[in-house]
Amino acid sequence: MPAFPKPIHLSHHFIREALNAGDTVIDATLGNGHDALFLAKLVGERGVVFGFDVQKSAIQSSSELMQSSEISHDRYHFLHAGHEEMNGHVVDEVSVIMFNLGYLPNADKSVITTEDTTLLALEQSLGLLKVGGLVSIMCYPGHDGGDREADAVRKWCSELARENYRVAEYGLLNAPNNPPFLVLIEKTK
Ligand SMILES: C[S@@+](CC[C@H](N)C(=O)[O-])C[C@H]1O[C@@H](n2cnc3c(N)ncnc32)[C@H](O)[C@@H]1O
């Protein structure tokens, strides 16, 4: 890894550390399914990936990516639903939950994640997360609305009880145009 990796690459590093083969994990923002495929390869043949997206096209393209990557159908459950509904769909404890906020590049840029539903989903994530598990949140403050959401996520995470959670933030301070940053939550108790 370079001295200062991109935030998303750093998130991959910590995710690899936090999960084991056979785990159940969640991609809270499926998009084109790249993060879900990354997770599916890590959890292996006994693991399961739940995925959420409000765009039907995201469910379609993510499913196609899994099929073309020969991930068997019983290893992923992609739901055309907001991540704020994850409690109604996931009952197992999970080791990793990935959020890649904002909009999907090369798609409808008016469909963005927003602080109201993102915070609801984060709240539910902590309930589903096993001790030692990780929530990874890529924030994109550079677009309209993304700044408000990023501020809300940072504030919410920074107020989590330190007895139960460790929270870290990482980003490049001198990159232009409100660069993306990563927030990581580890459940310790
Ligand atoms: C930056 S993209 C995700 C990229 C994706 N992880 C990938 O690997 O391609 C953000 C996605 O969040 C989705 N989204 C917006 N609001 C959502 C919500 N409430 N619940 C779940 N997904 C949502 C958008 O439709 C979009 O596909």
Image: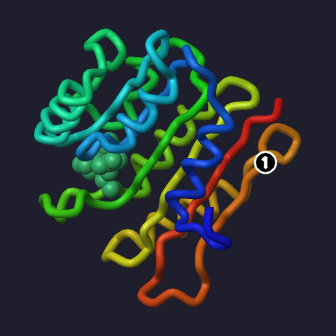
Tell me if residue 166 comes above or below residue 182 in the rendering: above
- The quarter of the image holding the C terminus is top right
The percent position of residue 86, horizontal first and vertical second, equals 41, 27
The percent position of residue 141, horizontal first and vertical second, equals 44, 73
Q: In which quarter of the image is residue 144?
A: bottom left
Disc 1: CA contacts within 10 A as few (<14), some (14-19) or many (>=20):
some
Kindly give the residue lying farthest to the front in the view shown: 1
Q: Work out whether residue 151 or residue 166 is closer to the camera in this orientation and state it.
A: 166
Residue 37 appears left or right of 112: right
What amino acid does circle 1 point to?
Answer: Arg
Tell me if residue 52 comes above or below residue 150 in the rendering: above
Residue at the image position 82 percent from the left and 37 percent from the top: 164
- The quarter of the image holding the N terminus is bottom right
Tell me if residue 162 comes above or below residue 150 in the rendering: above
Q: What element carries label 1?
A: strand
The percent position of residue 124, horizontal first and vertical second, equals 54, 32
Task: Return the residue at label 1.
Answer: 166
The percent position of residue 111, horizontal first and vertical second, equals 20, 57
Residue at the image position 18 percent from the left and 41 percent from the top: 58
Residue 43 appears left or right of 68: right
Residue at the image position 55 percent from the left and 59 percent from the top: 153
Residue at the image position 26 percent from the left and 29 percent from the top: 69
Q: Work out whether residue 58 or residue 85 is closer to the camera in this orientation and state it.
A: 58
